[in-house]
Image (cartoon, rainbow, N blue to C red):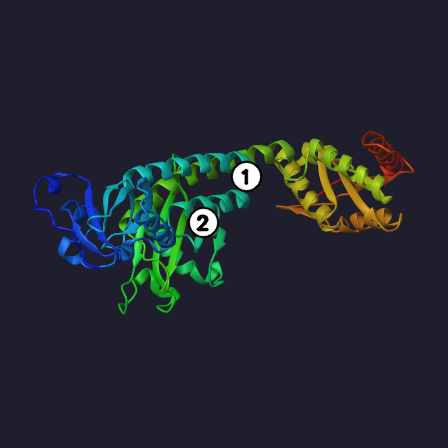
C-alpha cells in the first residue's frame, strides 16, 4: 500500500523532550524526532525503514504487537508502558500514546522515557521487600533465599552467592550459594576471596568482566575461561565494618553486567548487610537466653521447653523416655583448691564428655553449678538409661588434666523414667534429683579427694 505520510520539516517537533515516532502499516519507522536519539541511542537515519518491534524488549514484543493491531483497528491508546532496548543494550522503560491515521496510513506515537521513575519505584519495592524479609524470615538461610528473590527483581540473578566473614577463623564462608551449572562454592572460593579482598579495601562494589575472546581478569582465572564471563561483587557493610559480600556471576551465555548494575548492587548490599546484622544479633540474643555461657549447653529454660515437647511426643506415640540428673562429687573442693578458673575448665571438660556419651537427638543441659541433666528420648528399652549412666561413669575413669593438675572426677547420677516416676517435667526432675542425692550419700565416703 502506498504510504501517504509526508515527513514534517524539522522545527518545533525536534524541540520536544519526548520522541515523536511514525510507523507505517508494515511496522517500520518512517519518521522519528531528534529526541529519539537521546532516549533510544539511535540516530534517526539508523532506524528509518527498520521494524519498530526490533527495538522492543523480547519479553514485551507479543503484547506490543497486539496493542499495535488494536491501534490500527482504530482504537487510540493512551499511556501504554513497555520496555525497549537502547543501542548500548540498556533497558529503557517507555510510556507512549499512539493513534492510527487512516488518511496517512501510519501510527503516530509520542514516547516518553520513564526509566528513572520505574527504577525509583523498583528500588522502593525492593527496600520494602528486604525490610519485610528481615522481619518474617525464620533464620539466615530463609533470609538469603528471600533476598535472592528481591535481587532478581532488580537485575539478572541466576547465579548468586552470599558469603559471610568468620572473624575468629578469618575465613570467607558461603552462607548461600545458587549456581545454574551446579558448580560448588568451593570451586569459586579462590576468585571470591580475591574479589573480597579488593572490595574490603575499597568498600565499593567491583565489576570484573572479560570481553569475548579476551583473557579473564587475574582474579577470575582460577575458575577458568570457559564458564566465567562476569562477576559483580559488593561488600556487605555495616557500621561495625564489612561482614561479608554479595557475589553475582554471569557465564558465557548470560548477561554482561554493567556499571549501572553496580549501583543497584550497592543499594541492595547495604540493605542486606543491615538485615543480616539484625538477624545475627537476634540469633545471638536468642542463643544467650537459651544456652549456658560457660559450656554452651542448653540452660534450664531450654531444658524445660525440650522436656515439655518430649513428654507430649511420648504421650502421643506411647514411647519411653528418661531423665538423668548428675552432679560432681566434691566439686567445691576443686574451686577451693585450684581456683574458679580451674573449676570452669573442669565444667567445660565435663560438658564435652557428657555429650560424647549420648545420641545427637538427646539433650545435655547445665542447670546450675556442677549440676547437669540429660534428657533421653525415644528409648526402645527401659535399660537404655542405665547403659548411658554406666557409659558416663566409664568416661570419667580417665582423669581430667587441667594444666599441671590431674583431677579424678566422680559423678553421682540419678535416673527417672517416664511414666513410672512422673508424668510431668517437675516430677521427673524431682525424682531424678532425689535418686542422685541418695547415690551421693551412699558413696560419699568412698569418693576420692581431688589431688595433683
Quadrant of the frame with the N terminus: bottom left
Question: How far across and down, in percent of the image, does residue 189 sit?
Answer: 43, 58
Quadrant of the frame with the C terminus: top right
Residue 322 visible? The answer is: no
Q: Is residue 286 left or right of residue 168?
A: right
Q: Image point 86% across, 47% down: which residue?
A: 386
Q: Is residue 16 left or right of residue 28?
A: left
| Few, some or many residues within 10 Å of mark 1 (<14, 14–19, 20+) | some
Q: Image point 81% across, 40% down: which residue?
A: 324
Residue 162 is labelled as 2
SS at circle 2: strand
Position of residue 185 relative to residue 152, above or below, is below
Q: Image point 47% across, 39% down: which residue?
A: 276
Question: How far across and down, in percent of the image, does residue 267 sit?
Answer: 35, 40
SS at circle 1: loop
Position of residue 179 relative to residue 162, above or below, is below
Q: How many marks?
A: 2
Measured Cα–Cα span from mark 1 to mark 2: 16 Å
Question: How far across and down, in percent of the image, does residue 168 sit?
Answer: 48, 46
Residue 312 visible? The answer is: yes
Q: Nearer the viewer, residue 181 or 55?
A: 55
Residue 137 is labelled as 1
Quadrant housing residue 50: bottom left
Amino acid at each position: 500500500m502506498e504510504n501517504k505520510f509526508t515527513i514534517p520539516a524539522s522545527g518545533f517537533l525536534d524541540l520536544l523532550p519526548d520522541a515523536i515516532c511514525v510507523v507505517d502499516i508494515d511496522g517500520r519507522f518512517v519518521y522519528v524526532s531528534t529526541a529519539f536519539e537521546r532516549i533510544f541511542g539511535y540516530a534517526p537515519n539508523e532506524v528509518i525503514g527498520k521494524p519498530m518491534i526490533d527495538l522492543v524488549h523480547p519479553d514485551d514484543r507479543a503484547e506490543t504487537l497486539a496493542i499495535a493491531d488494536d491501534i490500527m483497528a482504530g482504537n487510540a491508546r493512551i499511556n501504554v508502558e513497555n520496555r525497549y532496548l537502547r543501542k548500548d543494550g540498556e533497558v529503557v522503560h517507555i510510556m507512549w500514546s499512539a493513534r492510527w491515521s487512516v488518511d496517512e496510513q501510519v501510527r503516530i506515537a509520542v514516547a516518553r522515557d520513564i526509566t528513572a521513575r520505574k527504577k525509583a519505584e523498583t528500588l522502593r519495592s525492593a527496600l520494602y521487600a528486604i525490610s519485610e524479609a528481615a522481619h518474617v524470615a525464620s533464620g539466615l538461610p530463609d533470609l538469603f533465599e528471600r533476598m535472592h528473590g528481591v535481587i532478581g527483581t532488580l537485575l539478572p540473578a541466576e547465579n548468586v552467592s552470599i558469603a559471610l566473614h568468620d572473624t575468629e577463623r578469618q575465613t570467607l564462608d558461603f552462607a548461600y550459594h545458587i549456581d545454574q551449572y551446579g558448580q560448588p562454592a568451593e570451586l569459586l572460593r579462590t576468585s571470591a576471596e580475591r574479589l573480597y579482598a579488593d572490595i574490603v579495601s575499597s568498600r565499593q562494589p567491583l565489576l570484573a568482566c572479560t570481553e569475548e575472546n579476551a583473557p579473564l581478569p587475574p582474579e577470575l582465572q582460577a575458575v577458568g575461561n570457559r564458564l566465567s564471563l562476569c562477576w559483580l561483587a559488593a561488600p556487605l557493610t555495616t557500621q561495625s565494618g564489612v561482614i561479608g559480600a554479595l557475589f553475582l556471576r554471569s557465564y558465557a551465555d548470560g548477561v554482561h553486567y554493567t556499571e549501572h548494575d553496580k549501583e543497584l548492587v550497592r543499594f541492595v548490599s547495604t540493605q542486606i548487610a543491615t538485615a543480616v546484622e539484625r538477624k545475627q544479633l537476634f540469633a545471638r540474643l536468642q542463643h544467650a537466653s537459651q544456652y549456658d555461657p560457660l559450656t554452651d549447653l542448653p540452660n534450664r529454660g531450654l531444658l524445660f521447653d525440650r522436656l515439655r515437647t518430649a513428654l507430649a511426643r511420648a504421650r502421643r506415640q506411647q514411647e519411653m523416655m528418661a531423665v538423668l540428673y548428675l552432679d560432681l562429687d566434691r566439686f567445691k573442693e576443686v574451686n577451693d583448691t585450684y581456683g574458679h578458673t580451674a573449676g570452669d575448665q573442669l565444667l567445660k571438660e565435663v560438658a564435652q564428655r557428657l555429650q560424647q556419651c549420648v545420641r545427637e537427638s538427646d539433650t545435655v543441659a547445665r542447670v546450675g553449678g556442677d549440676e547437669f541433666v540429660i534428657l533421653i528420648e525415644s528409648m526402645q528399652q527401659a535399660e537404655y538409661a542405665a547403659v548411658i549412666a554406666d557409659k558416663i561413669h566409664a568416661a570419667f575413669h580417665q582423669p581430667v588434666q587441667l594444666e599441671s593438675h590431674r583431677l579424678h572426677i566422680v559423678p553421682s547420677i540419678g535416673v527417672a523414667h517416664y511414666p513410672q516416676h512422673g508424668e510431668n517435667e517437675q516430677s521427673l526432675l524431682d525424682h531424678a534429683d532425689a535418686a542422685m542425692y541418695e547415690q551421693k550419700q551412699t558413696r560419699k565416703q568412698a569418693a576420692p579427694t581431688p589431688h595433683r
